Amino acid sequence: MAKILAVDDSASMRQMVAFTLKGAGYDVVEATDGAEALEAAKNGQVDLVLTDINMPNMDGIALIKELRALPNYKFTPILTLTTESGSDKKIEGKSAGATGWIVKPFSPDQLLATIKKVLG
Amino acid sequence: MTVDMSQFYQTFLEESFEGLDTMESCLLNLDVGDADIEAVNTIFRAAHSIKGGAATFGFDEVAEFTHVVETLLDQIRSGERPVEQNLVDYFLQSVDCLRTMLHAVQSEAPVMTDDVRALMQALEAALGGEHVATVESSTSDAQTTNSDGSGGQWSIQFSPHATLMKTGNDPVRILRELSSLGDMTAMLDVTSLPVLSEIDPEVCYLKWTIDLNTDAAEADIAEVFEWVSDDCDLQINSSMVQQSSEQSTAPVSHEKKITPDAEAPENGLDIVSLETSFKLLQPQANELAKRFYETLFLRYPQVKELFKNTSIEQQQGKLIAALQTVMQQIREPEKLADTVFALGQRHQNYGAEKDHYALVGETLIYVMADMAGEHWTSKIEQAWRQALSMIAEIMLSAYSTKTPVASDKVTDAKPSGAAPAPAKPSVTSDKNTASTAPKMASGESGSIRVSTDKIDGLINMVGELVITQSMLGQLGEDMDMSKIEKLRDGLAQLERNTRELQESVMQIRMLPISFAFQRFPRMVRDLQTKLGKQIELKLSGEQTELDKTVMEKIGDPLVHLVRNSVDHGIELPAERVKAGKPEKGVVHLDAYHQGGNIVIEINDDGAGLNKERILEKARSQGVVGADEELTDERIYDLIFQPGFSTAAEVSDVSGRGVGMDVVKRNIRELGGSIEVSSQPGVGSSFKIRLPLTLAILDGQLVRVGNETYIIPLVSIIESLQVKNENVNAIAGQAELYKLREEYIPIMRLYEVFDVDPDSEDLTKGLLVVVEGDGQRAGVFVDDLLGQQQVVIKSLETNFKRIEGISGATILGDGTVALILDVGGIVKVSQNTKGRPKRSKSAVDKSKKDLDEKLLEISDGANKAA
């Protein structure tokens, strides 16, 4: 089953995302910020990255840029988790190389539907 | 897939409280006019996370409020708005307000109070009346539906830019998604495809012309291309509009519908009957709720158990709120189903069982019928029965979907005993929690956050323990004398493992004292403004670790002491200048380890304690005799007397005289002590000494006859052999021992506990001089045995509280020894003096009960092991 890297500095969001994805049978790797996520991504190939934008240490935008610079992650789908109000964040993420976005707040069902769309 | 969101509530609340603490401390350090951008970012991020979480987990009011705060913060972050003092004040108020709101969420009390609304309006006004978009709730399904029912034939030109794939997008995925909307025919245009040798695999050369036959709306089709709208040329044309005759039905998000009964009139529920009867009863809602619970408990006493942790007033409020919500949403079946479903999940957490629903329904109908009187018709009753049974059905359907909480995660490691908290019925529902809210810092939650390193260390040690155990096991299988050396080694190793494990487990409960200190910057800031003083708060030793329980209990005494220092200690700026001191006073909080204790010092460079006034007050209260001379130490100690305050005027900050005695009592209850020292004009210093943990104490084992007792080492001053010439017996049976210049009462332990001693002759035993609750006493025992660390087992949880005994422990040989509560035993001895002794058999009986109980417990523990 596909392996997903879930990055968010909020523990509850991470828990919710991880629980939902695991429940649907995905392998989940969790990271609390960009730096940790980059490390995790380098340690083992993941099939999809879900990342929050606003995080300490390394934010989501910087993470996306770093990931896209890695040969292994050139085409890996990366989805940002952004809030409705941050529509410029969608664009910023997109131009940094994100595949798409999921708008917060989202329900577990919406999350799964989007992931399924991307992973097929 | 249904995910029970309530399992994440606790984490959300914890991280939100932490976020609020961070916000608060950053706000306090924020320089008006020249704000540190990183600090503003941190504050913004905290607010942002709370908003996101609140919206996701369905706490809409919290999300709505935080949204306003966040919008303001965003303007500061982007430089649109300077940091002004009034904004900082607003933000600090918002932090308090959010704390209150989250506590309300925790206790399921109403979140949106008038205070919240007022502050929100103020914030919105600060925003300049800009329209603040409200946040979407998580449950609302964002899917657009084809409301006008137009479906049909679409022609789509999809020409990806060469770079489309660079963002991880894939035309194939888009086509696949498109095909899921209806019948699709795609024509591939390969004209741009270069010769094979020139193909760059990272570039998209293809284009498509797509015919799609679908009922989906144009917006749905466009949504498929949402992520790539900048990476392609796209044209979506309706080639033929076809009026769909079948009106698309309203989307149903739940499998369970409110309208399952096809035979019922209209859409299943007799809404008209429900609404009319509810309107009739609504003015008497309070009465209804009151009578409902009265009747329920009268008819079905068994359900009373479910409400033992909550106040009935609160329950009545909840019942009314639930009824109102149901009636408000009754015309919106999906929404109602969601609400009721969520309610069901909560009820499961409370322990409500299936059978209870029928009881509740019956009772409700009975009470309503009774109150409605002649207006109650069989039609109405039928409508309510139907509605209630549907609601019960949906609520019960929530039960089966509840998944057990996985506790196998190491990253967020929590003690496995920590249950998900939303189930915890809360006691605090007082609306006036605003002022007490900051007290309930995150440290008081039932769970604890432990670093992965600590857990890994533990696992490692358990691993070693297992190795030692298997080694010893092997030795035991064929033991002979030649292996005695190995056995000894193995046992030594076991001892080391056990000790290390014990230390590490204790470590887990240890938190840095900064958790207790963090509230002070804000408090001092608020106080100095209020009192017109200038104060610098210095904190040091914040990383000193302390047991979580001790930390929670020391919080309030510390607050009291710091308040006192600020209010009474530090002088007004003018006075300070007059005394030749800098205008700004200093309050210094320091923590450090010393021996097996943690020491917390609160120092100030204020006026110092006024000896004369304390003495005068003590004399007027008759605490001290008119011509009694006291040492400075004893004088300062007087401030811990109940009802003792020398503040000339009672201020609302401190000085009511309730407090210092409570401070001292709280510290004593933790097995600690407090000392005061002071120098007029230079300042005062309070020194609190606390044990690092409450679970283990250093004990002195003493023997009386065949019994072993444990006296906490901290309360022992000395032990001595009694000389007859120093013993004075005075009237009323009290015996006094002359210890140097002081007379202390002698307590014969065998008398207190009614056991047979070796000897009743004082010279044949030993006198242990102890101090408890400020009183010294000599405890007469047969012998001192040894000192050891003992693990305290609570008597109350397994047996009952006994005066003079603080707990029990199991000794190495398996016998149970009682741990003496020195303060209590002094009291007991005073009470038993001159009174007939307790009947021996009664004491024996309670002791026998206790032994049996303790045996059971240790048996249980052995079995579990």
Image (tube, coloured by chain):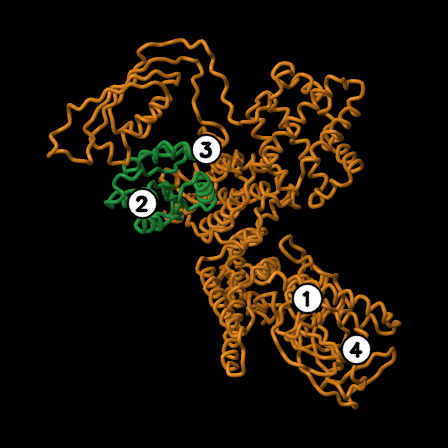
Horizontally, residue B252 falls left or right of residue B614, namely left
Specify whether residue B809 is in view.
Answer: yes
Same subunit: marks 4 and 3: no
Q: Nearer the viewer, residue B782 or B286?
A: B782
SS at badge 4: helix
Name the chain under label 4.
Answer: B
Mark 4 neighbour density, 10 Å: few (under 14) some (14–19) many (20 or more): many
Q: Quadrant of residue B342?
A: top right
| Chain that appears orange | B
Q: Does B159 sit above or below residue B444?
A: above
Q: Which mark is residue A63?
A: 2
Q: Amino acid at mark 3?
A: Asp
Horizontally, residue B242 falls left or right of residue B687, namely left
Q: Color of chain A here?
A: green
From the top left corner, tell me how far across and down residue B745 is, in percent: 77, 79
Q: Amino acid at mark 2?
A: Leu
